[in-house]
Amino acid sequence: MLELKDLENRSIYILREAYAEFKRPAVLWSTGKDSTATLWLCKKAFFGKIPFPVIHIDTTYKFKQMYAFRNNLAKEWGMNLIVARNEEAIKEGVGPKDGKFECCTSLKTQALMSCLEENRFDALILAIRRDEHGIRAKERYFSPRDEDFKWNYKDQPLEMWDQYQSTTEDKTHTRVHPILHWRELDVWEYVKQENLPVNPMYFAKDGKRYRSLGCEPCTSTIDSDAKTIEEIVEELKVTKIAERSGRAQDKEKAFTMQKLRALGYM
Amino acid sequence: MNVNVVIVGHVDHGKSTLIGRLLYDSDSITEGRVEEIQRLAEEYKRRFEFAYFLDSFDDELKEERTIDTTGVMFKGKNLYSVTDVPGHKEFIKNMLTGASHADVAVLVVAAEEGIQEQTGRHAFLIHMLGIKRLFVVINKMDAVDYREEAFQDIKNEVAQLLASFGYHHVDFIPGSAMEGDNIYKRSKRMEWYHGHTLIEALDGVKLSKQSKPLRFAVQDTYLVDSDKVIVGRVESGTLRRGDEVVFHPSEVKGKIEKIKILEGELEKAEAGDSIGIVASCEPKRGDVCGLVENPPVPTEEFLGEAVLLDNSVRKGDVVELRCGTRRVKCEIKEIQEKINSETGEVMAKYPDYISQHEAATILFATEPLVVEKFSDIPELGRFVLVQDRNIGAGVVLEVPK
Ligand SMILES: Nc1nc2c(ncn2[C@@H]2O[C@H](COP(=O)(O)OP(=O)(O)O)[C@@H](O)[C@H]2O)c(=O)[nH]1
């Protein structure tokens, strides 16, 4: 078994490296289990207080429960929360009807880009994991993005041992992935061990639960009877269903995800 | 136990297929994936390949080659993180990225082709990375009618190559990743072979920690409640409250008053632990501490073996060197031997420069830092070279006393 302690140690090391190497880091928080666990790791790394802003990208299409969860925890953990929205696109009524790719690009990627520019963040901490889907398996812990947010996946930096490439030229930022080496199961076992708060939508109601949380129109449930964290852990030990099977942007076309990511999507 | 396995070998010898086979036979493929792959194969007008179980970039499918590393996990007796690395020379930096965390390497050699350029180079590099456990799969045995002589011939050839890198008594497994022989399941088509299947060999791996002297690398100092907390990682050995330690190159001495984590205080911390300490002295990021009785020794010169992935470097060039959390300027003082990274042979003595993809033993003159001989404390015996970006990597061979 992968020891949670080893996973945690490594993540804390990475977070502290990022904090030492970058001038203006920030962490992205979707309110989902992975990014909430990442915030908890930040609290561990920095002894209780997250020393940089927490960004939540609000597409306005998130589930009601996510907003409530966000506001409560932000208060409880004393976060410096920045809510990023692409107000212009929201006013124009951009939504899933315009196509998943367009909608994600406009409401998520664009919103994030403006937020980064305004605040001049040079590092963005993201809770992606290698085992999630597709090309995330190829990510580095420190991954540079160019000024257009593009991920040059054909020429990624050499990243050996724990020597992460932290030099970025002007106007670019680096994505930092402290839980890249965790599996979905590890995250749930960690949630259980650390007694972390989770959005109740992850638990089964009437035989269905959310396994991954996104925007309401593009996220669907899986069949499940797991009503507690323990039951989720047991379910994951035997399941053969991919984690993001309920997320529309992964399904629509095999490589939509790659394109989105190359364009700076999370 | 978690075991990191890297699969290396020349392009097209069957690395990705072998991993796909391991995933498939160990029942680790998610639902719908087989159908998804059949659909993809159709879209790209290809036949079904086990290699498609690995995630890939659009371009990798189009160009039919692996560009960057991919990681997958599956469970046997151990929990395996398996890394697929590209077999092309131009992607060596991705290969090293993938191999640098490996505990075990599997070298794949196709039976009908034998040793090719990257077979040697990958063997050289995993040797340089200090990966001691190595298994060789002689793959595509189906293409040579599962003949024992074919296996023996290649085995002898490869054994000789590996011996030159110091690998003796290596297990050789005749297999077919495509047909599934001796990878996860025992083959009935090679009755002459009585050794392990690949999964049996991997399941037999035991990782043990050696006891080493204490080394703690400083990342930063935070102010927590009125305590100045020095954060970092125990790289080797054990750190205990009350220890008398010395930090180098800052050259400050002190006593460990507290070992802190968010939840409270600890009596001791072990190798791998990310912790905070409160000590009666003020070290800096980049410092390394050890016990006063067995301290790290700062140096301004050491001999390393490095491979260059980007650019070329000349004698007299100054580059940045990173080891642990320390970054220093260092001069390429002397290139002692240029090494052919394909064969390990010395190509030139005291050349003026080395180029991309070449390896060399180099005498570095640096600002003071702590490095350890790679064979003693690997955690502080490896470094990367930086010139705007990470351009090379190496290990420490000798540190003058
Ligand atoms: N005959 C035969 N072909 C194989 C075997 N393993 C892989 N191949 C084929 O060799 C080609 C290259 O395999 P791949 O796994 O992509 O090689 P890699 O570049 O080393 O990852 C593919 O067409 C595979 O179908 C095998 O055991 N027998």
Image (cartoon, coloured by chain):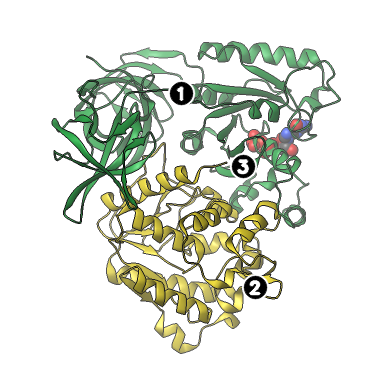
How many residues crowd around disc 1 within 10 Å: few (fewer than 14), some, or many (20 or more)? some
Q: Amino acid at mark 1?
A: Gly
The label number, if any, that marks residue A241 in the structure image = none
Beta carbon of the mark 3 residue lies under 8 A of ligand 1: yes
Residue A40 placed where, x, y %?
40, 59
Q: Is residue B388 left or right of residue B298?
A: right
Camera-nearest residue between B36 and B325: B325
Residue B225 placed where, x, y %?
20, 56
Q: Quadrant of the N terminus of chain B?
A: top right
Q: Chain of mark 2?
A: A
**Chain with yellow colouring:** A
Camera-nearest residue between B119 and A79: A79
The mark closer to the camera, 2 or 3, is: 2
The residue that mark 1 highlights is: B130
Q: Amino acid at mark 3?
A: Arg
Q: Quadrant of the C terminus of chain B?
A: top left
**Looking at the rendering, which quadrant does residue B21 occupy?**
top right
Q: Tag 3 or tag 1, which sits nearer the N-term?
A: 3
**Chain with green colouring:** B
* Picture residue at 60% right of the left edge, 12% below the top: B169
How many residues crowd around disc 3 within 10 Å: few (fewer than 14), some, or many (20 or more)? some
The residue that mark 2 highlights is: A220
On whether disc 2 and disc 1 are found on a single subunit, the reply is no
Q: Is residue A56 left or right of residue B352?
A: right
The label number, if any, that marks residue B65 in the structure image = 3
Task: Give the spatial CA distance, label 1 vs label 3.
Answer: 27 Å
Q: Are marks 2 and 1 in contact (CB under 8 Å)?
A: no
Residue A266 placed where, x, y %?
48, 63
For ligand 1, give the image quadrant. Answer: top right
Task: Give the spatial CA distance, label 2 vs label 1.
Answer: 47 Å
Check the image and report above or below for B390 versus A29. Answer: above
Q: Chain of mark 3?
A: B
